[in-house]
Image: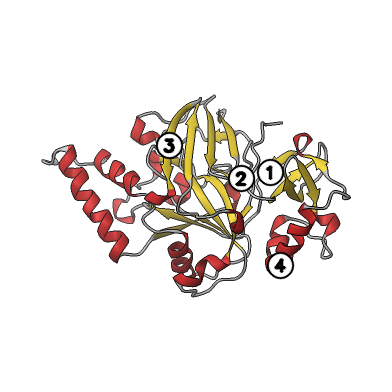
Amino acid sequence: MATLAPPVGPFALGTLSAPGGSPFPGLVAGDRVLDLSQVLAWEPSDVRAVLERWEEALPILHTLADEDALDWRPLDVLRVHAPVEPRQVFQSGANYRQHVIDLEVAHRAPDDPRTVEEARAEIAEVMDRRAAEDLPYVFTGLPSAITGPYDDVVLPAWARKPDWELELAAVIAKPAHRVPVEEALEYVAGYTIANDLTDRATVFRRDMPAIGTDWLRSKNAAGFTPLGPWIVPAGSIADPSDLRVSLKLNGDTMQDESTKDMIFGVARLVSYISQTARLLPGDLVLTGSPAGNGIHWGRLLRDGDVMEGSITGLGVQRTRCVEEKA
């Protein structure tokens, strides 16, 4: 079993299993877990079924977390899976100011006459205008890319530049369609950690440049989105715009940034997505990755690498990279 970090607050949700057993929706309180399929009246088979009745479930979960006379299991003997199986995954790109500046500078044309300092200053002005005047950049991912927070990540043989992107993910509580920004956070059940891996070599289509980005190939390989370990209720997170996002590669810190650097916050993203799509309980809204990706460091993922990702109050995920065998 992986070393587990407790989430903030009185409890969190997770998907767990005993050795040889089937996954179950768990209430995680400290170092113990309660099987919610055994104690909730509607016998939810998974965490999404709990989220589908979130307003009813939340006060019950608070009560259960304080009940000692129940069939609690020790956390350290259970396997931790991805906390939820979403129907839809929405991913925000270019949403951290410093990250976008770093990428733009790194991808300057060879004949760009600007110095690095001049380029950074101009791009920073563009980012400020985006926050004030523009819309978020959002695309969709595949639920089949999701894997557990302690599972190995298989690097496909065709992925020549696999990179990490640790992100805060919002988990939707109830159907949301065309909700205003001022009400958007009311539709968020809680938060979790996502590592939105990307193969930088296949982001852009070289055969047809006019098409632009190829998110299917670059981001949606099986297991390219380690998720979890927990869903921490929104009420336990004082301010989602003031959390520390940190990723270590083989013990060395590569990403370490506050969500304050987001160009569009959680409420703006949820509201924007809902203007087009109908968000459903358990859906994920990934909020973008901060500066410090492998493309910035000139060091991409390879066989044997261990990534440890943490976000304030949400626990820690730890995944090992395994090269796909030809």
Mark 3 and mark 4 lie on one chain; the one further toward the N terminus is 4
Q: Is residue 94 left or right of residue 142?
A: left
Front-most of 271 and 319?
A: 271
Which residue shows up at 84% across the image and 57% down it?
Answer: 39
Give the amino acid type for the residue marked by disc 3 in the picture.
Gln
Alpha carbon separation for disc pair 3 and 1: 24 Å
**Mark 1 — residue?**
81
Query: Residue 208 at x, y = what percent?
Result: 32, 51
Which residue shows up at 74% across the image and 39% down it?
Answer: 31
Which of discs 3 and 1 lies nearer the camera? The answer is 3
Q: Is residue 81 left or right of residue 34?
A: left
Q: For residue 315, which numbered disc appears in the image?
A: none
* 80 lies above or below 24: above
Specify the quadrant of the image occupied by residue 128: bottom left
Give the amino acid type for the residue marked by disc 1 in the picture.
His
**Mark 2 — residue?**
228
Where the N terminus falls, by quadrant? top right
Which residue shows up at 73% across the image and 58% down it?
Answer: 62
**Mark 4 — residue?**
53
Alpha carbon separation for disc pair 1 and 4: 21 Å
**Mark 3 — residue?**
255
Mark 1 and mark 4 lie on one chain; the one further toward the N terminus is 4
Q: Pointers 2 and 4 in contact (CB under 8 A)?
A: no
Does residue 279 appear anywhere in the picture? no
Front-most of 251 and 135?
A: 251
